[in-house]
Amino acid sequence: MGAMTDKHAAPPVSRRTLLGVTLAGAVAGAAGCGVTVPPGERATTEAAPPSPRGHEPGERSNERREEVLVGSPLQQVVIPVAGWGRTPDGRDIAVMVAAGSPGTITVIDANSGAALEAFELHAEDEEEDATASAWAVAVDSESGTAFVGTTDGRAFLIDTASMSLAPVVGVPADRPFFERAVPDGDGGFLATTYGDGRLLRFTPTPPDDRAAGSAPGGGTWREYGPFGQENAYSIGLARAGTDAYVGTGTSEPAVFKVGLTDGRIERIDLPAPKPSYSGERTFVYDLAVSGDYLFARVDPENRVYIRNTATGHWTASIPDVAPGLAVQHPGSSHPALFFAGLDQRLYEYDPVARTRPVRRSLQVSALRGAGWIRLPGRRHRYRLTTTNATGMLLTWDATSGGSGRIRADVKAGSRPIRSLGVGPDGRLFAGAFGTAYSVATYTPQPLTDEFQDGSGRFGTLPCHGQIEAFGVHGHDLLAGSYPGANLQRLMRWNPLAPAGHSNSPLSARLGNLLDPDAEAPRRRTSGSRAVETPEDGLDHVKVDLDLAPDTGQDRPVCLLSHGGRVLVGTAPDYGQTGGALTIVDPAFTAQRSYRDVVPGQSPLCLAPGRTRDEALAGMGPAAGYGAEAAAAEGRVARIDLRTGEVLASTVPVAGEMNVSALALDADDGTLWGITRNSVFQLRVPDLRVLRAQRYGDRRDSARYVTGRTLHDAGTALMGCAGGDIFEIDKATLARRLIARGTNLLRLESGELYYSRGSQLFRRLH
């Protein structure tokens, strides 16, 4: 699901995103995240930033150049979901969208894995980021058409006979975040959306009815909804004849039956949760229909409820079910449900007999869309086929019971950079939008005129999840990841080890995580786990720690090493408000959490207090998706780490939603901070506002605002917010815009690195 970030000119891309980077150790004077200032202040004239232009690999000569393209460090295949169907000539296909900048649609032969055609999803405007990902993909075998709805509100049609792509025109003006898609049974498509939580129906204009010279992506849109009160999500989707079923979240998770002809909407409430489940329900995440049975998977309960649509009663439920549902193959009329369990195995369930689900031979962590593929030359023999995140096709033969894998020829995408950090060994680390199994590494090199644009060499380091923020604690590289508010220790640097050994990851065996064709279990476990690295004999350990358990946290947005401990600021789970500040002990075996230290706000950035038992936090009303922000103005708070008490608090800039980045002044000990539009200076410890300057009045968001940083550079501040890289003179507060980008890093040497979309840049002047 998407989130607001400071990616250069780009709308949301990843499925559930956020961030805030506060770095320690190798990043000089930084304690950061984003930017804001008080209304009524005189605006300061500033120079316009240089226009970002595309950099072609191989470009040389640093004269007159202000930035160098290091490269695109995150070349990975990440498939959120696939659509399955058949071409008019009877070939079984899968349609996959590899998330990236640009994203790429690939049409795959589902029996061989061969690519039949690929389309890059470039931005409509050259100045826009071409980032694209898609969760709404469907194939209508009857019409020979496929539909792709992206996370940034674009839609495309694929003619599977000619293998041609056409952008859909007339997409609703709010450019919805498309969640799921299915054929509507009449040559069109249904799609659920995030934002307004509606159901959309798109009916393509038949070729014979198109006006001469008109584009093939024309058609009509119809909207259904809203569903319930203040539901931001319509997500689960299934169709049965002329009725559609929609699953909602996060305000009122329920199922809604929609008459596609008459528009009538009927609410179907879920049964009460089992006594063993004490958590909140957030979404009806998956829906499927088989015969007279409706299957509804509820998240994060991970339980499927079964309803007999003929009698109107919920009849049974199945626990421990991972995302994705499939029903029986076309050659069978007997209702059946197929799903992945949390133990990463495929199961089959008979809703008529209501017997225990039968475990099948396929190992799979989730069904990212699934289709029944006919074996070549065997018209009545089917394989259930799905994909994992790397585009590997996973198959189960319904006749023989055997399972297999087919490598799909999916083009890797250049993943947008979600987070940047500097490790204890001086290397740069980049995390991608969306779930990943590794972060990219880069060792800064001296630049000469011989350096060619885009020729930077990158390595990888294992991780899991979406890395929201990096941090350093002693010789340890830390990362906070989503989902589940997880703290990972990715690497321990040994400065005395020979070259090469000191750069090895802490764990050579992370279960399935080092196998790019496997995925991590989805069951969350609390506590930590350690694995020794055998290569150099050092006591290297990998630690995973679930932060602030039982407090509804989901995204670690900032990390800070302070007083021999690790401080982590988190934003809450879907549908909730109120983040938490967590203190983790040096051994990563104990933690203490304070939720809602400033009511309705989340810690977006951290800075050290004057003692080891105090910290400074920049706050903002970042709330879980689907929840309304509880506060309108961001605050700076001085917090007692022993009790969670707020010792002092202030609104540094009236009207600004987020205090996005903080940095202590190395000379006088005052606290600098930025918001979306401003800079301010506070006296510590009473947090009295000494100075503040507003530079504009651009709208901020109560959603997760990420990629904003601030660094003390002596007589100036270096920072980024709203896609701008800037320098602020401490004496005059005059601001100079120097580039477009986000995730600004300033090394101890003074070198500046930042990201723009999927690309990593170094500033020259």
Image: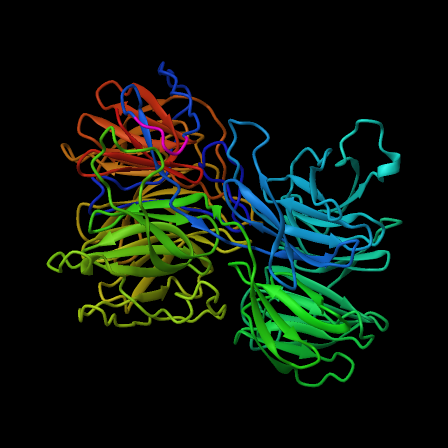
Q: Residue furthest front?
A: 377
Task: Report x, y in % for residue 728.
Answer: 28, 24
- Furthest-left residue in view? 496
Residue 462: x and y in percent read 35, 60
Q: Is residue 170 left or right of residue 95?
A: right
Is residue 674 a member of the stretch shown in magenta? no
Front residue of 400/619: it is 400
The quadrant in which residue 289 appears is: bottom right
* Residue at 36% in and 15% down: 47
Would residue 438 appear left or right of 685 to someone viewing this image? right
Find residue 420 and report its image quarter.
Answer: top left
Q: Nearer the viewer, residue 414 or 595?
A: 414
For the record, the magenta segment spans 56-60
| Image x and y of residue 650, in percent | 34, 37
Which residue is nearer to you in this view: 353 or 268? 353
Q: Nearer the viewer, residue 144 or 342?
A: 144
Taking the image as shown, residue 261 lies to the left or right of residue 371, namely right
The overriding secondary structure of the stretch rendered in magenta is loop
Q: Is residue 697 above or below residue 749?
A: above
Q: Residue drawn 39% across and 40% down?
A: 707
Q: Is residue 388 visible?
A: yes
The quadrant of the rendering that contains the C terminus is top left
Q: Position of residue 489 (x, y in %)?
A: 29, 61
From the viewer's perspective, tell me whether residue 230 is left or right of residue 142: left
